[in-house]
Structure formats: structure tokens, C-alpha cells
Amino acid sequence: MSPDAIDIVPLEALLERVKEKRDRGCRLVQISAARLPEGVEVTYSFDLKNRLSNVRVLLPDDGTRLPSISAIFGCAVLYENEIQDLFGVGIDGLALDFKGKFYRTTVRFPFGSTKAPAPPPAPPAATAAAGPPQNTN
Amino acid sequence: MARTVIPFGPQHPVLPEPVHLDLVIEDEKVVEARPSIGFIHRGLEKLAEKKDYNEFLFVAERICGICSAIHGQTYCQAVETLMNVSVPPRAVYLRTIWGELSRIHSHLLWLGLMADGMGFENLFMHSWRIRERVLNIIEATTGARVIFGVCKVGGVRRDIEPDAIPGILAELDSIEKDMRDVTKVFLNDKSVKARLCGVGVVSKQEAWDLGAVGPMLRASGVAQDMRTLGYAAFSDIPVVPITRTEGDCYARCAVRCEELFQSVEIIRQAFNRIPPGEIAIKVTGNPAGETITRTEQPRGEVVYHLKANGTKHLQRFRVRTPTFANLPVMLKILPGCDLADVPMIVLTIDPCISCTER
Amino acid sequence: MGYFQMSRLALKWALTKPPTSRYPFEPRKVIPGSRGRLVFTKDNCVYCTVCAKRCPTGALLVHRAEKKWAIDRLRCISCGYCVEVCPKKSLELAGDHAAPVAARAREFT
Ligand code: SF4
Ligand code: SF4
């Protein structure tokens, strides 16, 4: 598969795109993140009739948070927790948040940037408390 | 009704690997299952930054001890795509043969664990006795029993001599007969059926929505098998996915039983058609670009996402193993089942936790 | 029906010799072609350190100046990568396995 089968979308359009995939009956194959010098690149892969299609967003390192797609694809929860724990990306609206305890890594964010994770947005106070992933050991 | 929380795992007699579930129980029924994994995160993906792409093959093969052969094969396929290398056909056939042998040994291992999980020790011993014979073939052809170590970027490291083929085929015939005896028990025995039928039912739609893969998905009636993509020698050897419609533990067991014989058939065909010639080509240079490669492992579809930037280290190496995709389904079917059925349900997804966490 | 399938199987195997071997008393059968212990032949080695550099587990240690070659048996995974890269063919994987050891140590040659 060549990279041109990857659809790069702006962050705001992500949920809409994913919803569209869902409506077409796609299966979520994986979510994978990769660290680039300028930020974290998150790729969502979908499968329909054995054809793979990808949606990609780029998260700059300035503390931008990723919206969770777990309301659309329930199984995304595990992938998103993984990204949260390994990359130190904050994720909003996780259906099940392990709060950084999904993987018990010695290094806090093995793929993270050197900066600390962004503080959660203020408004929804209840979820904000669950905010940034904490991995103590 | 008072609720009780029962911890299941990380060490539990039916679990070959550590996964922890907090089961919220009401009477004898599970009402909620909260998973927690991460006991054996090894950071293999991070290691890609330290090992060059040839050495990393040995790491990729060790993601999983049971589907090692196919991990190695998928990794090589992915790197070969990046480097635009086409592998000699003989090597492709050899990879297919070893991949299917590993599928047989993995399914037999699982059948044994399953029998052990339901307390059928005798059946467990028999499954593993047959598995041992498969491992002997594997050791004689690859030099190792579970971590084959025969794939390399550009081909394979070893050849199977033409003189050895009739012996292997004869051994396979006899193994097939043995497997018939054992699978007959799995499929027809009254006590096995009583334990598995109607337990942990997943509907077709649910399985698809939750992203299930492999035998889990096929047992619910979705004919999806990555081998139909035609990678390796599957472009010449057609594979018809084996499906069941019940979607319960019994169906998943039956799918795996039938896949044993399908794999034997594939190996026979591959030996029939294997072309002579080179087994490897020399690969020079470094990979660059990006690829997502999917293959079918004994447990289901595995996804390799590789990014390379022209240096000898991969920029990003990411694997999504089949168990990772099957966990959400497991969590979905646990609520509502009997506490006594939990081990069966956990086992039928064929959990391979180490590769889930990598 | 169901019950007798297992009984038949069980009976058959109750009357046959066990397929397992009595391991410590009976040595394990060596399967030809198996990748086992790494064997080093001192004679043609030129101490180029290629094997030590390539070994994925870091099991090998080669001193070019002192002409020393060492292996940590517990680290070696018998992958055969060093055998492949050695320019002088002084490494080889034997079919048998190294004797069990209790502690990690480098064997110098
Ligand atoms: S690669 Fe071969 S010749 Fe070079 S040091 Fe190792 S054993 Fe000796
Ligand atoms: S066989 Fe593999 S692990 Fe052992 S010394 Fe050689 S390269 Fe290292």
C-alpha cells in the first residue's frame, strides 16, 4: 500500500470523517500513532471488503488534544488509551479512561515529546479531573 | 442483590499469560468486566530505534512465541514493500508452508489449552502430543521449534530439500489422521458440547462493529480471512474462509478445528507447486516510505505499520496484533455470562497478551 | 456416540508405548539441522569483530588487539546471524545444545 491511500484531514474534520466510515459499514482495523519532529501523527485504518482506507491527522506538540472516536467505534478505547500512555497525547471524551495505567512503563511516555502533557481544557470540570495521563513509576 | 468484585488473573490456572479482569458479580452472573493489562509491556516498538532493520527481524519474530513465523514473514513483507524487493517464488512458497505449519501448531496448542480450561486433561495431552509431531517437522526444516528464524528480508535462510518433501508429506498424512481423532472429540463429545454450546454468543453485526478478527469473526459468520488478499503464495493457492454462524464458544472451537485441515491442505498444495530456484536475493540499501501490511495469523489479522526515512533504523514500527482487536469483543460478551463460563470465554479469543502489549 | 470417541482414543493410547521420552535418563534425540550451540573455530578467525557488532542480543565480545573471542551462552538465542556475517566462516551452529549453566558468564576463547 502506498502512502497516497491515506487521507490527511484537519483535526476538526476527524470525527465527521470517522462517522462517515462508520456509516459505510467499515471496521476499525487499527489506530496507530507515530512521532514526527513536529508532532504526533495519528492514523486511523478502516477495512471494508478487504480494502484498507486510512484517515490521518497531525497533532502538533503544542498541547493540542485529540478527540476520542470511542463514541463512534467502541473498540477504539484500547487504541486511544495506548496512544495516551505511550505518546503522552491528551484525549478528550474517552469512553473508558485508564488514566495512564493501561501500560505500566518505566519511562513515562516512551514516544512522548520532552514537554509535559497539556492540561485538560477547563470547561467540563467533571471530566477535567480525569485529565492528563498519570504514570507514576 | 449485593455485588461482589472477583479479581480474575493476572495469575489464573486457565491463563497462559497475565491479564487481569475485575469481574463484578451479582449472584453467579457477571454484570461488568473491567480489564487491566500492561503487566508485560516490553517496549519492542521503541526498540526499532536501536536495532537496524535487519536485526529488528529477530525482535519482530519474538513479539509472539506462537505466531512467530508469521510475524517474521509479515515484517519481511512490509520491509520488502518499502524497499521494492520482489522475493524469489521458492522463498514465498517456503514462507507459506512454514506459516501454515505454525498455524497448525498454534491451533493445536489452543485446543489443548481449551481442553485444559474445561478440565478435560486427557484431551489436552492428546492435542499437545500431536502438536509435538508438528514441532518436530518444524525443527527438522527450520532448525528451531517455535521461533523459526528462517525469514529474512529478501527471502528465507533455509531451503527444504526436495528429498525431504515425501517424508514430510507422509508425516503430515499421519498427523492429519491423528488430528481427526482428536477434533472428533472436540466437535462431538457430549461434555465438551455442554460446556461450549451457547456460551459467549457474539452476533455477526456485533463482532464486525467491535473490530473482531480471525476465528472470532469467522465463527460469527463473517467470511474474512486476510489470506484471501493473496499475499505470499496465496495468490496461487486459493483460501476459502471457514465460517460458522452460531458465534458461540463451540463455533470458535469448530472453526479452529476445521482450519487445521485447511492448513494441511494448503501445505500439500504448496509442496505440489513449489517452484525450484533461488531462496533469497541480496538486499542492499535502506528502506524508505510507509506501508501498512496485513496478514492472517492463527489468531487473526495482524497489521504492521512501518514508516522509514531512508536510514537503517525504522522511524516507526507499529504492530496491531489480533488479540488486541479481539479484547473489546471479549469485554462485550463477558457481562451476562455465568462466572463458571468466564474461563471459556477468555480462552476462546485465544488470548496472547504478550503480543498485545508488545 | 460422544462418550466412546474419547474412550477409544484413551484406550488406544493406554495400550501403546508413551510418545514422551524419560528425559534426564534418556538423552534428547538430536534432530539433524537443528540450530543449537554456537561453535567457534579459532583457527581462521581474524578478530574482525563483525559478529560481535551484528549479534542482536550482544552475546559476543571480540577483542581485536588481544585476539580474544567470548560468548555469553545465556544471551545467545541461536539465531545464526553471526554465522551468516562472519567473513571467515569460523562460526557454526551445532545440532546439540549447550550444557545448562547457573550463572551468566563469558566463555573466553
Ligand atoms: S566475524 Fe568471524 S572472523 Fe570476524 S571476529 Fe567474528 S568469528 Fe572472527
Ligand atoms: S547466534 Fe545470534 S545471538 Fe547467538 S551469538 Fe550469534 S548472532 Fe548472537
Image (tube, coloured by chain):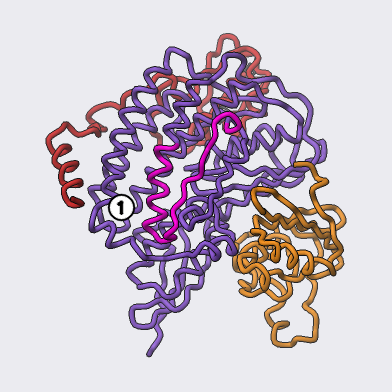
Chain colours: A orange, B purple, C red
Q: For label 1, count other residues whose C-alpha is less than 10 Å away and answer few (under 14), some (14-19) or many (20+).
A: many
Q: Foreground residue, A128 or B246?
A: B246
If the picture is divided into quarters, which one holds ligand 1? top right
Q: Chain of mark 1?
A: B
Instruction: Residue B93 in the image: state x and y as whole percent.
Output: 56, 25
Answer left or right for B280 relative to B108.
Answer: right
Establish if B288 lies above or below B249: above
Establish if B38 lies above or below B158: below
User: Magenta includes B292?
Assistant: no
Instruction: Residue B306 in the image: state x and y as whole percent.
Output: 72, 44
* x 33%, y 48%: residue: B112
Establish if B310 lies above or below B215: above
Answer left or right for A45 relative to B289.
Answer: left
The residue singled out by tag 1 in the image is B115
User: Magenta includes B255?
Assistant: yes
* x 45%, y 33%: residue: B101
* The quadrant where residue B12 appears: bottom left
Q: Foreground residue, B167 or B187?
A: B187
Instruction: Residue B293 in the image: state x and y as whole percent.
Output: 67, 42
Q: Which residues are magenta?
A: B234-262
Q: Foreground residue, B320 or A51?
A: A51
Q: Residue furthest top?
A: C43
* x 48%, y 15%: residue: B161
* The quadrant where residue C63 appears: top right
* x 67%, y 65%: residue: A80
Total numbered badges shown on the rendered structure: 1
SS for callout 1: helix
